[in-house]
Image (cartoon, grey):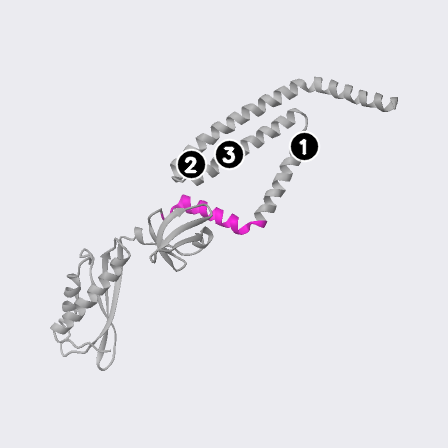
Amino acid sequence: MHAWTDLFNEKLHNWWITGIKMLPNILLAIIFWILFYLLARLLRKLIYSFAHHISKSKAIAGLFSSLINIIILAIGLYIGLNILKLDKIAISLLAGAGIIGLTLAFAFQDLTSNFISGVYIDFNKPFDIGDLIQSNNIIGEVEEIGLRSTTIRTLEGLQMLVPNKNIFQNPITNYSRTTSRQIAVNFPISIQDSMDNIERIIVNAVREVKGVDKSRAIEFYYTDFDEQRLKVSLLFWIRQLQLSDSMTAKHEAISAILKALKDNHIERLK
């Protein structure tokens, strides 16, 4: 019994002596940890303000500021452990964190993919909140851009959460940034004895349609013919403010063409 007591007292004495000898290192390590903690907080605020100024996104700013905060704290922890001569523990912790990170990345591949796509969308800005876009056969107004998904309000009034990966990997049409658009109208007409005035009649009719961009030429082409008819292709540009502008312009152009053909006794064939 005395042997165990002596061994225990000897261990306590050795630990006490080691603790006294390590006291300067412990104090220095604590000072380093406090300094790195304060530095991490300061850099987190600065990085948040800088990232928010560039991306205009609180989510992106919070992400980068948090990453910087974690990196600074990890560096401080590593230095403190080295001061305490526990560098092997520090290396083990870093290796373990790396393995855990890789494991989580493989386990949540879709989440990681959506996350990276969200960061790309936020920085590259192919669209903004309020834009009318089309992606994956979904047309609607962007209500929110998150790091995992984008919220779109469809033309039917449905709210849809679209994973950012699906948007990133597919073509995006941004109607809000499409200020001009070309409209094509194709139709057949009968072959007349005189074809000289047909192009002028049809082009003049379309030029009077509301919304047609008169600064651009209206293109008129005969694309094919047979014994009785000619196939006509008419191309013109409009200034598009809303998605419905293209449908409205095409509707009014067809109405104007039909009226012009009828008024000039030009037969329209099937």
Q: Position of residue 69 (x, y in %)?
A: 52, 32
Q: Quadrant of residue 263?
A: bottom left
- The majority secondary structure of the magenta stretch comes to helix
Q: Which residue is mark 1?
A: 89
Q: Which residue is mark 3?
A: 68
Q: Which residue is mark 2?
A: 51
Q: Position of residue 178 (x, y in %)?
A: 29, 53
Instruction: Look at label 2 and name its amino acid.
Output: Ala
Which sits earlier in the primary sequence, circle 1 or circle 2? 2
Which sits earlier in the primary sequence, circle 3 or circle 1? 3
Question: For the residue carrying disc 1, how many other residues have a C-alpha within 10 Å: few (<14), some (14-19), or many (20+)?
Answer: few
User: Is 15 rendered above or below residue 95?
Assistant: above
Question: For the residue carrying disc 2, how many other residues have a C-alpha within 10 Å: few (<14), some (14-19), or many (20+)?
Answer: many
User: Which residue is rendered at x = 35% and y = 46% of the image?
Assistant: 129
Marks 1/2 in contact by CB < 8 Å: the verdict is no
Instruction: Look at label 1 and name its amino acid.
Output: Ile
Marks 3/1 in contact by CB < 8 Å: the verdict is no
Instruction: Look at label 3 and name its amino acid.
Output: Ile
Which segment is the magenta one? 107-127
Asked if the magenta segment contains residue 116, the reply would be: yes
Which sits earlier in the primary sequence, circle 3 or circle 2? 2
**Foreground residue, 19 or 232?**
19
Task: Count the marks.
Answer: 3
Q: CA distance from mark 3 to mark 1?
A: 23 Å
Q: Secondary structure at mark 1?
A: helix
